[in-house]
Image: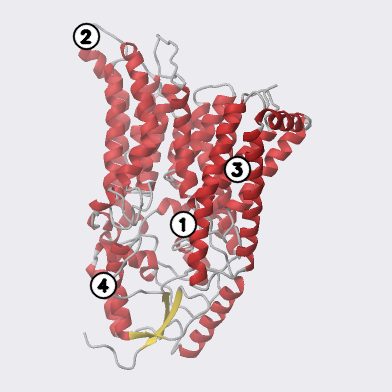
Amino acid sequence: MTKFIGKQTNKNTYLLLALDFIYALSSLQIFYVELKNFWSDKYFEEDVIFSLRLWGIIGVGLLLISFLFLRDSERVSTFLGNLTSNIAGYAKYLLFVGSLLLYGFFSLSPNLNWNSLFFFQNFLLLFFVTLGTMFLSGTSYPFEKILFFSLALYIIIISLGKYLLYINDYPLSLGWSETSSYYYASTFLSKFLYGKKLMLPYRHHSRYLLLIFPFLISNAPIWIHRLWENSLWIITPLLTSYLLLRRLNLKITYKVILWFIGIVLFILQGPIYYHLLLIPICIFWLFDSQKFWRSLFLVIVLSAWAAISRVNWIPVPGFLAAMLYLMERPVTEHKDKISSIYKYLLFPSGWVLIGGITGILTRFLLPILFKVEKTILYTDFNSTLLWYRLLPNPTYRLGILLGSVLVSLPGFYFIFKFYKARSRLYNILRVIGICIILLVFFLGGLIVSIKIGGSSNLHNMDAYLLFLAVSVVYLYFNFVGTDNRDTFILPQWALMSLILIPIIYVSGFSRPIPELDHEKADETIRVLQRTINEFSRHENDVLLMTEHQLFTFNYLSGLEQKTIYEKTFVMEMAMSENYPVLKQYWDDFQNQKFSVIIGEKMSSGHSVGQYAKENYYFIEHIADHLRCYYKKHENLPINSIEIYIPRKEPCKE
């Protein structure tokens, strides 16, 4: 029996020293943050004092164990080894789950300032993973596998578990545009829900179509909608990983389970949105590389879905079918090489070409299908490209280029070593085809990522991440169609890094939702309704420019709801400088068309911060014009929302 302590003395020593080192860095970081809070009068909070006391107890205990362990490691090893070996089998797993739940409780706490406590977050992870590994140490698996498996399992459960925190009845938005999705979904049923037709969404139509279903339940509260959407966030990565591995006909082993977790983590690096993941889910499930017409029908349907999802995903169904074909079908050698190449490339070329044409035609039909003007639908092509965001910047601290390379390195190292070892076994045509697909989507992802309004993570590199994951999985499990299969072994560190990089990336960029104050939210809604009743000149002359769920779920009455004033729409028009729409805004403000405008807090002057360029366009084209003819009415308990009423004397332009 492999014990966590005992024969693994050296490994445990290194692990303990790593814990001590990260704990020391965490302590310095916490001391620095709390010292700043002290001078800004934010220190005297009971929960902060409790956390510091708990932190001190953990530190004293850890240092004591370290001292005893390093002074007489053999005796302490024997003691802890006997302690864990006496725990019953089922109890080990219960204790492991318990340590996982404790980590979740601490890591998802909204009271922690995760932007300032990076080392503390990693200490918590390593501490609880070590604790969980100790409880499972009496099983038949080696120490390294248990430790690595625990680490991967902790991260995937916490990464997916954070979505559960979003399932609540909090009436205000949990993020900048979280509840905008529910409003846009409701517009498809606006005649039924509101008694009048509203303008349909201008983008991401497939996403909002998926969010329609809770509206089929009469008067479904907001938590039902959040339950449905966050279930999609959780289920789709799991289903994508499962169907990809199932396609390889693998037996369930420790290695396969670890790869299942790794693929999910790789998807979460983007993340890849749930409405887009339906495309690989259907391809992995239904695509048959030997049946052209059946697969072509699938590609056509999915290409149309991609066209109403995101423009850069139009070629994905065809190219994904082509990649699976290149992976699964070897080149049949003939004397006439040109004939061999033609016959081999006929199927994938057909899928790519016809799928692409279908997507483009569907895209051109969007103004008819969704009755939205072309100048609004195609703003993506007029957006500014911010090339500096390829490099480290305030919007994304790694930069799109460095972040993409970082998550790609283990996969490309593996592909390079694999091909170098087996280059004679695979036709160069297949290798070139796979490399071209990866290169096309890598460059395409970079261009889309530097568009203004994005660049805060790798979600616009999503198609590239998907193709890279498929390539590595097929090569690792040697499922590439060939009659010459030999064994290929990578160094252990290289295999671990394939999953370790996603673990580090996902854990480092995960953030809990802020603490929710229901009383302040309810009071804010009461003040808003009181203001509407007081200043409204006639029915529906109050404009809502933020928190559109207040209209969708009937938290407020007497509102004039226009899709062109939904805040994500307004921001898009400002960033793309769509002057016909902007002029309509300016005219409405100048004519003081609305007696009350409910909007988000608007900054003024020079814009700084994570989205400085986006805020600049909003201030220039929206905020300055609004403030010229409207003034702030009163402060609200939730200070991210502001009320504006007409000025008696508009500013001089």
Which residue type carries mark 1?
Asn
The foreground one among 374 and 325 is: 325
- Residue with the mark numbered 1: 115
- Rendered image quadrant of residue 11: top right
The local secondary structure at tag 4 comes to helix
Give the alpha-carbon distance from disc 1 to disc 2, as whole Å. 62 Å
The foreground one among 517 and 549 is: 517
The foreground one among 264 and 295 is: 264
Labels 4 and 1 touching (C-beta < 8 A): no
The local secondary structure at tag 3 comes to helix
- Residue with the mark numbered 2: 336
Q: Residues within 10 Å of mark 3 (few under 14, many from 20)?
A: many
Residue drawn at x 20%, y 14% as measured from the top left = 338
Give the alpha-carbon distance from disc 4 to disc 1, as whole Å. 29 Å
Which residue type carries mark 2?
Asp
Q: Residues within 10 Å of mark 2 (few under 14, many from 20)?
A: few
Question: Which circle, 1 or 2, is nearer the viewer?
Answer: 1
Q: Of marks 4 and 1, which one's residue comes earlier in the chain? A: 1
Q: Of marks 3 and 4, which one's residue comes earlier in the chain? A: 3
The circle drawn on residue 620 is 4
- Rendered image quadrant of residue 12: top right
Answer with left or right where residue 591 lies relative to residue 556.
left
- Residue with the mark numbered 3: 127
Can you say which quadrant of the picture contains the C terminus? bottom left
Residue drawn at x 27%, y 24% as measured from the top left = 432
- Rendered image quadrant of residue 620: bottom left
User: Where is residue 209 shown, x and y percent of the image?
Assistant: 46, 53
Answer with left or right where residue 468 lies relative to residue 222.
left
Which residue type carries mark 3?
Phe
